[in-house]
Image (tube, grey):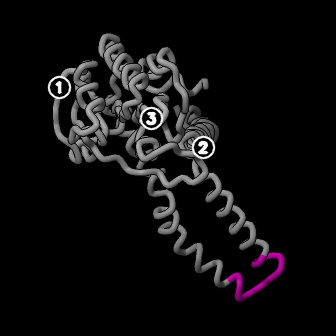
Amino acid sequence: METMLNIYNTYIVNILDIFILAIVFYRIVLIIKGTMAIQIIVGILFILGFTIVAEYVLHLRALSWLLSRLWVTAVVIFAVIFQTEIRNVLARIGGQLWGLKTKVKDSYITEIVEAVEDLSVSMSGGLIVIESEIGLKNFKETGIPLNADISKELLLSIFKNKSAPLHDGAVIIFNDKISAAGCFLPLSYDTGVKILGTRHKAALGLSEVTDAVIIVVSEETGRISVAYKGKLNLNISSAELKEIISTNGGALKSK
């Protein structure tokens, strides 16, 4: 027993420690990949290297003192800069632990895809959100609660009538129900992405802070787009859309 304990304390605990840290860093990299956080981290590493050079190589006392004071407040600075990424990590961990992720039934997927096809042909704008692990209650509360069964006719009645009060907002779907309509979504301010309109900005904005699949139909071109995890995928076909919804956005990873 004592030998096993010594082996654990000497070898296994270190291996376990490194393994857990590797998983944590890997998951963080996956979440921030493709976002501005990467550039921020590069900048932070540059400042860290400059601090070491200034203090231990060039011996610049005044600059070293100023930089050392900066690192004292680094925790607060990191929390402010990475508040979105930190919130996403915690929300996804919580969602996985509680098993909130759901899959839309095939019959309802058909209703959604057919409605999107109709909106595309008629060039009627549309914005449909399919909730996944991260809850969207705060966004649902900005719209009108429906809790209605998913149907092509209901979706078309919301979006095809441009004078309807709910036309310009988003429809949020969860647990095979249209939870709410006319919902307001956060706009993306990513200037590095070519955005076609307000709906696309809203779709991309929500995808940056949640893991929802957001479907956009352009009112100007009729083209179908999907926003997922901070990326806007343009010109999606009906077949691709069906696969994307079926896999909760997983089909986009191979694109």
Label 3 crowd bin: few (<14), some (14–19), many (20+), radius 10 Å: many
SS of the residue at dot 3?
loop
Label 1 crowd bin: few (<14), some (14–19), many (20+), radius 10 Å: few
Q: Nearer the viewer, residue 154 or 161?
A: 161
Q: CA distance from mark 2 to mark 1?
A: 36 Å
Question: Nearer the viewer's eye, disc 2 or disc 1?
Answer: 1
Is-magenta flag for residue 187? Answer: no
Amino acid type at mark 3: Ser
Identified at 80% across, 83% down, the residue is 59
Q: Point out which mark residue 148 bears.
A: 1
Name the residue tied to disc 3.
218
Splitting the image into 4 quarters, where does residue 115 fall?
A: top left
Chain-order first, disc 3 or disc 2: 2
What residue occupies the far top of the structure in this picture? 107
Chain-order first, disc 1 or disc 3: 1
Q: CA distance from mark 1 to mark 3?
A: 25 Å
Q: Give the residues in magenta.
A: 54-64
Amino acid type at mark 1: Ala
Name the residue tied to disc 2.
33
Looking at the picture, does residue 66 appear above or below residue 87? Answer: below
**In the rendered structure, are the residues bearing label 1 and label 3 in contact, judged by CB atoms less than 8 Å apart?**
no
What residue occupies the far bottom of the structure in this picture? 62
Q: CA distance from mark 3 to mark 2?
A: 27 Å
Question: Nearer the viewer's eye, disc 1 or disc 3?
Answer: 3
Amino acid type at mark 2: Lys
SS of the residue at dot 1?
strand
Question: Nearer the viewer's eye, disc 3 or disc 2?
Answer: 3
Residue 105, position as x, y percentages in the image: 31, 14
Residue 199, position as x, y percentages in the image: 41, 42
Residue 4, position as x, y percentages in the image: 56, 32
Per the picture, the main secondary structure of the magenta-coloured stretch is helix
